[in-house]
Amino acid sequence: MITFSFNGEKVEAQPQSIEQFVHEHIGSDEGVAVAVDGAVVPRSQWNRDIQSGNVLDVLTAVQGG
């Protein structure tokens, strides 16, 4: 088990990649941006594993006006 922060909430989970986490918790990766420890992670690097202690921020684009 690893422990990390997801959008300000403490999470305990099995080790997994950013991509797996996004698909599990957000559903679609369309319009999604991810930052780990304050640094934006390009989608091409989402195969990297989330580490214990990471601060993961996931943002989704919303249409409207």
Image (spheres, helix red, strand yellow):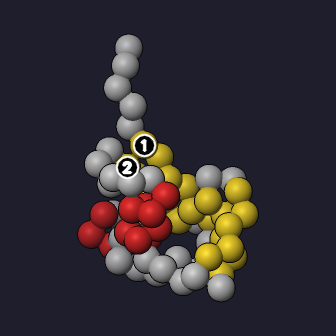
Q: Quadrant of the N terminus?
A: bottom right
Residue 40 visible in the shown view? no
Residue 60 shows which numbered tag?
Answer: 1
Q: Position of residue 37 (x, y in %)?
A: 58, 65
Q: Is residue 30 above or below residue 38?
A: above
Q: Residue at x 62, y 59 (%)?
A: 6
The reply, left or right, for residue 26 in relation to residue 46 is right
Q: Nearer the viewer, residue 45 or 26?
A: 26
Give the image location of residue 5, x and y in percent.
Answer: 66, 64
Q: How many marks?
A: 2
Dot 2 lies on which element?
strand
**46 relative to 50 in the view: left or right:** left
Residue 51: percent from the left, percent from the top? Answer: 58, 81
In the picture, the disc for residue 33 is none
Question: Residue 32, labelled with which disc?
Answer: 2
The amino acid sitting under disc 1 is: Thr
What residue lies at 38% left-to-right and 37% top-to-bottom? 61
Q: Is residue 65 above or below residue 49?
A: above
**Disc 1 + disc 2, Cβ < 8 Å:** yes
